[in-house]
Structure formats: C-alpha cells, structure tokens
Amino acid sequence: MSSIYDQHLPRTRANHAPLSPLDFIERTAEVYPERLAIVHGSLRQTWGQTYARARQLASALQRSGIGKNDTVAVMLPNTPPMVEAHFGVPMAGAVLNALNTRLDPEAIAFMLDHGEAKAVIVDPEFAGTMARALALRSGTAPIRVIEVSDALYGPAAQALGGTGYEDFLAGGDAQFDWQMPGDEWDAIALNYTSGTTGNPKGVVYHHRGAALNAISNVLEWDMPKHAVYLWTLPMFHCNGWCFPWTVAARAGVNVCLRRVEAQAIFQAIRDHGVTHYCGAPIVHGLLVNAPAAMKAGLPAGIKAMVAGAAPPASMIEGMETMGFDLTHVYGLTEVYGPATVCAKHGAWDALDIGERARLNARQGVRYHLQRAASVRDPETLAPVPHDGETMGEIMFRGNIAMKGYLKNPQATDEAFRGGWFHSGDLAVQYPDGYIKIKDRSKDIIISGGENISSIEVEDVLYRHPDVLAAAVVAKPDPKWGETPCAFVELKAGASTTAQEIVAHCKAHLAGFKVPRAVVFGPIAKTATGKIQKFELRKQAGSAAAIDV
C-alpha cells in the first residue's frame, strides 16, 4: 500500500537531477566567468575559458567516436590539460583514467589494455614511457594518441605520431551542448591501485561519489570562495582526492606545478597567494626541513592537508612554526581518497605538542557526506568496543565508495562483504569515536604468540630526532617465530647507531616490541611513495640486518 507521500508526487526532471561534479564548473562559469581558474607559468586562464575548453575537448572526443563509457587515459602532470580532462572527458560521457606518471611502461601497458582505453592524452615528459607502453600492449584495438605541448618542459624526447592537443581541441565546439549523466551511478573515473602483488585493480568511481566527496572537502576545510589551491598532490592520485572538482565548486584558482620542490612551492605561495594545498607526509616534511631563508616572508594561515601516514610531532611542530594549519585525513583509492578526517577541537590548542601530536595522529571520524566509518570485527562485522584498545578492521559504508573493481567481481564481492567496504587496515576506536590505525592486517608481527603492531613501533622510531623515515616488518626467528626488524633512513649528517635506535625504543616500548635488528639506508617505495613492505620482508633475513 503506497503512502500518501507517494501518491501523485512523481519524480521528474523538474524536481530531481543526478549529482555530478560537472555541475560545479557549469555554475562557476555562469557566475564567475572572469575569475581566474588556472595559473601555469605565464598562462592565466579564467573559468569561462576553462569551461569552453572542457566543452571543446568533450566535443572533439565525441567527434572522434568516443562516447558513453569509453575510457580516455591521460598521462599528465599537474598542468592545465589535466584540469581540463577532469571535466571534458566525462562531459563526453567517457570515463577518465588518470595514469600514474611514475609507473613503468609494463604497468602502463597493462592499464591501457585492461581499461580498454580508446584515447590517451600524453605530456611531452612522458612520451618515451608511453611509446614503450604502447609497444608492449597485448591488445590490438587502436588507441588515439593526443600529444600535449608545454613550454615549461620543452619538446618531447620522442614523437608519438599523434594529434597535437591544441589541434585536437580546435576540432571541437566550445559551445558543445554536453549532457549531464542520465544516472549519477554512471562511471566518471577509473583509478588503478598500486598493488604490491599481482596486477593492480581498477577502481571505478561514479558521479555521485565524486560530487559528494568534492563537497565534503569543502566542508572539512571550511573552504571559502575563490580559494587558491596549489597542486602539490598528483591529480593522478585518486583524481587529486577529488580536488579538481572541489576547486571548481568554490570558483577557486588551480596553481599548477610540474615539480614538487621546496623552492618552487614557497615561491608559488608568495607569488599567487596560495591558501590551500594537499600532500603526502614527504611533501610537508620537505617544507618543514627546508632552509630558514627559503621560508622567509611566508603568509600565515595556509591550510595544509596530509594523508598517507600520521603526522609525527616534529611535522606538526614544524608546520605550526611556519604558521601553517595542518589537517590529517585518511582514506584509500576505493573511497575517493580522504574519507575520514581528524577533526580538531579548540581545547586541543592548549595541550603540549606531544599530546596534540597524539590526538592529531588519529585517522579521526567520517567525512561529512560519508554515511559511516567504523572499526569492526572482520569476521562477525560487529563494532569493536570504543576503548582505544580492541583492534578491528576499518570499514566504510555510504556514498563515498567505489562502484567496484573493473572486471573483477570476486574482488568486488570480497571488498563489500556484509554490506561494508573492507579497508584491510586494522585499528582501534576511542571513546570519542575517533579511529586510530594500528596496522595493515598483513603487517602484524606475531612474536612468541604476542601480536606486535608495526605501526606502533614505527611511531616510536619517528620520535627519534635523527630518523627521517622508518618501517618495521617481521624477521624470521628460530626461537620466537618472528621479531621486529626496523628499516631506518637517517637525516643528513646523522650518525646514530643501531644500538642507540634500540635504546630509544626500549625507553618507549615493552621489551618484546623492541626491534631485534636494524637496517640503515634508503627504504624501498612504490611509484606513489608507499613503503614496499613486501620488499623489506625479503631483506629482513639478509646480512644487511644488524642484530642487536
């Protein structure tokens, strides 16, 4: 029996429209057409111009035979064509596949084939890699190659025989009558995970999730109109955590940056009045550890967002010294980048730096428009007690979750088992509801029957003043089964010994958690900067590990 609220109250185009971030650029171009949208070298491009170019791109793609649910790959740095692609590709009904520019040709070839790319837009810097990737493809379907020119980089080392980007756009209509998606569940983007074993998985985003996470970014950061956003975070990483769409929603400025270098970042902040930027801990650390002279004259109040690892006390203190306001977020590719935030409270300001670091190191609470983020028993799915001690798996549910893994129904079913997205991250939940990661499920070290959180040991290592980077994995042990092995990168000029590292850990950890071996030197990382613990495990039993 229908409700009175269902009778004669139809859903029509007049009272219902699919959510999509494409709506953001259309409105901004209508309301603020003359506002600055993109800065790149000497280029100054307005929102009216950016919208017109996105429409040209969409039109040109359709005229070349690319349409609904076709994949358009891009291998671009943080430059204007990358901003334009985030709107022009989905305006054509196609799906944007932003390729990780740090990957090798073999990985790129796999992604082009697996995603069935119909076209690829390539920056001159990556022409050589793309040439090799195209040659390595196992697929035979043709891919349209569109080559970007950039005076800030120079000519490509290798021509790909494709169409120039500007020539391609010239074949499109700047007044193209593009259509919003008929269903907000339509795919908008394809992003590949940087898996440590096997081929990467293709994560599919929908228009609804992209729009809602973009809006959540605004809400979490209290982001004002006309914010000036510096692109230090790669736009290929979870579509820049959805910030290309967020900046459009706020009629902000995209300050492009080809290279993440301290001098370039500080100069851009001064020259363009940057108000916001995002990055991995290594980016913020780059700024904190830069020479004092390089930081002179920085404006106060710049908003910085960090994810990828909890910010240590030294980073928080360093950012505060520069006058930057640091926000810690957490997420995964499968949840559009950040999906929880360590929302700060005014009362924390009165605490000492150590306590503020402890509180800010937590992964926090759900994003505004994410339905739920919870720590649950991975088997029963029951929520763990909020005692800060009982470990479970972080799970998400709601609008900010992927459609699933492309062509991989088994992995999709496993990820969504029981109606929750399973992150694979082990955590506790505190009485105030804040989540704190303790480990990846596969990174727990079991020593003599005791569980040791590698992240807990890493947190202690990072508190040593000479440690630049640290990672802890299990080392096989004939007596205990496994013991912790610490991999340590020291700061320039430091000469700390393995014995001193162990002594530091003994002062802060139970005896069974203290590393029994220490390895000094560069720590293996993936192309996206994630520590390759599977490689470290291989090294842990070698002679390079100093037993102490």
Image (tube, helix red, strand yellow):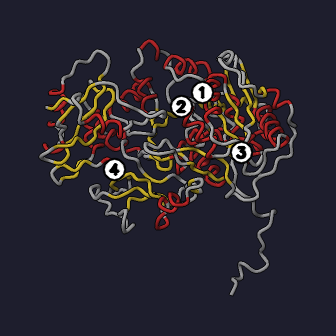
Pointer 2 or 3: first along the chain:
3
CA distance separating discs 4 and 3: 40 Å
Mark carried by residue 104? 2
Residue beneath disc 1: 129
Q: Is residue 304 left or right of residue 285?
A: right
> The C terminus appears in which quarter of the rendering?
top left
User: Which kind of residue does numbered mark 4 sit on?
Assistant: Lys
Mark carried by residue 442? 4
CA distance separating discs 4 and 2: 26 Å
Query: Where does the image place residue 349, in percent across and percent down from the top left?
Result: 37, 39
Q: Nearer the viewer, residue 526 or 500?
A: 526
Query: Where does the image place residue 262, in percent across and percent down from the top left?
Result: 49, 20
Residue beneath disc 3: 24
Looking at the picture, does residue 468 appear above or below residue 334?
above
For residue 122, which quarter of the picture? top right
Looking at the picture, does residue 65 appear above or below residue 121?
below
Pointer 1 or 4: first along the chain:
1
CA distance separating discs 3 and 1: 34 Å
Q: Secondary structure at mark 3?
A: helix
CA distance separating discs 1 and 4: 33 Å
Characterize the local packing of mark 2: few (<14), some (14-19) or many (20 or more) Cα atoms within 10 angstroms: some
Q: Nearer the viewer, residue 452 or 115?
A: 115
